[in-house]
Image: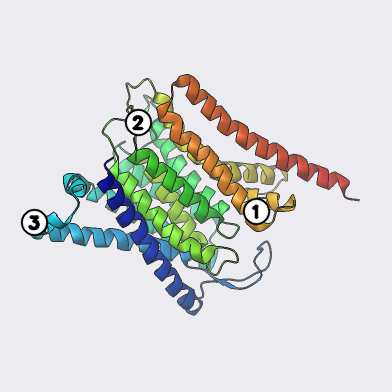
Amino acid sequence: MEMPMVVALVGGALLGPTVVSLALCSWVRHVAPRFGWVDRPGGRKIHQQPTPLGGGVAVWAAVMLAFLLGAIAVALVEHYPQLARWLPVAIRLHLAGLVSRAGDLAVVLIGGTLLMLLGLYDDRRNLPWQMRLAVQFLVAGALVISQGGDWQLTAFLPWRPVTWGLSILWIVALVNAFNMLDNMDGLSAGVAAIIALLLAVLLLVPSANVPGGPQLFVGGFLLVLAGSLLGFLWHNRPPARLFLGDAGSYFIGFSIAVASLVATYTGYESPRRHAVLAPVCLMAVPLYDMLTVIAIRLWQGRSPFEGDKNHFSHRLVELGFSRGQAVLLIYLVSATCGLAGLALPRVDLFGAGCLFLMVVCVMWVVGLLEFTARRNQRESRP
């Protein structure tokens, strides 16, 4: 990608939303108590002070505002063509293509908004898990089916209903994975920012095996999301002064899941079809946390939807890590797995196998260390 395009994308799609999100989060921190958006300590919660919720609303609003301003700018350029000369040449060349994806963007933002509202209501009323899952499956199913198979997992399966079902399950799984990961200051939003940035790099600097060149629509969307998360993280860093809430984790999980479905990782006839595993590598940490927590709850004879302190981050703290160290370790593991996913489209089948096994080994080592240490702790207790 040409340097002017890189500068324009980073400056407009990443830095702009970061500044907007910073300001919106500051405002939400002051008004949240008036609406009852406050998370109070107690039970399985580890924070010590009442903390405003609504950070997810600020992240959502920053994303929406960024695209609203972009739509206004495009409308002005179309109405006053002379304004186009103020745009970088690289932007002007791709402007028509970006405008053609406006309908797709609207679909993503509508779906994300519906789940944000679901999470916002859940923050206040603590909805039953059956209702939450029903709405999530409904929104995910409507999105996948309404696009006629264009937005689905690249699984190279001949049975479209199976691919649709896997795609819907992928969206719902990531919505809940990021929701479960939101259990420690800076954790869910930080991991989401790492994943969004790495996935944006994968799509904006594609290998020769990815048809069509840089994927500006999805890459730009991910940069906007990452910028909004970075602005929020300033307020969510330990000790957090603002929480994401279910509204934010639902919106983030949905946005990243849909972006990973819309993206193209390889061509159907490409010898490197293994690149379709890149999203699995990128999402390794959220999926690991969700699957291990569900396994622990089922092993203990409890509902997988019952909250507890068995999350990846909690298990690390039990081993002696501080909360900040636990979050940093999870960041590093997420970045390591994500970098492996970044390299998948650029290696042959043998290299892809090595990279994918590396991700599996990293997560396996983490699992062995934490579960062995926990077992030794239990055995040493009188």
Is 8 placed above or below 29 here?
above
Secondary-structure class at tag 2: loop
Whether tag 3 and tag 2 are in contact, CB under 8 A, the answer is no
| In the displayed structure image, the side of residue 299 where residue 76 appears, left or right | left
The residue under the point 54% across, 25% down is: 354
Above or below 209: residue 283: below
Question: Counting other residues with Cα less than 10 Å from the Cα at mark 2, is it few (<14), some (14-19), or many (20 or more)?
Answer: some
Q: Are the residues at dot 3 and dot 1 in contact (C-beta closer than 8 Å)?
A: no
Q: Which is more N-terminal, label 1 or label 2?
A: 2
Q: Earlier in the sequence, mark 3 or mark 1?
A: 3
Residue 203, position as x, y percentages in the image: 35, 39
SS state under label 1:
helix
Q: Nearer the viewer, residue 200 or 248?
A: 200
> In the image, what residue type sits under mark 1?
Gln
Please give the label number shown on residue 207: 2
Q: Nearer the viewer, residue 192 or 88?
A: 88
Q: Quadrant of the N terminus?
A: top left
Visible residue check, residue 307: no
Q: Give the class, few, some or many, for how many residues have Cα within 10 Å of label 1's Cα (few <14, many ≥20).
A: some
Q: Which residue position holds label 1? A: 325
Q: Is residue 108 visible?
A: yes
Tag on residue 13? none
For badge 2, the amino acid type reads Ser
In the displayed structure, would residue 96 be above or below residue 46?
above
In percent of width and height, residue 43 lies at: 69, 65
**How far apart are the two marked residues, 2 and 1, measured between alpha carbons?**
35 Å
Instruction: Give the x, y percent position of residue 233.
Output: 49, 61
What residue is pinned by disc 3?
81
Residue ID at (74%, 52%) = 318
Q: Earlier in the sequence, mark 3 or mark 2?
A: 3
Instruction: Say what amino acid the circle numbered 3 marks.
Output: Pro
State how far apart marks 3 and 2 are (Cα). Answer: 34 Å
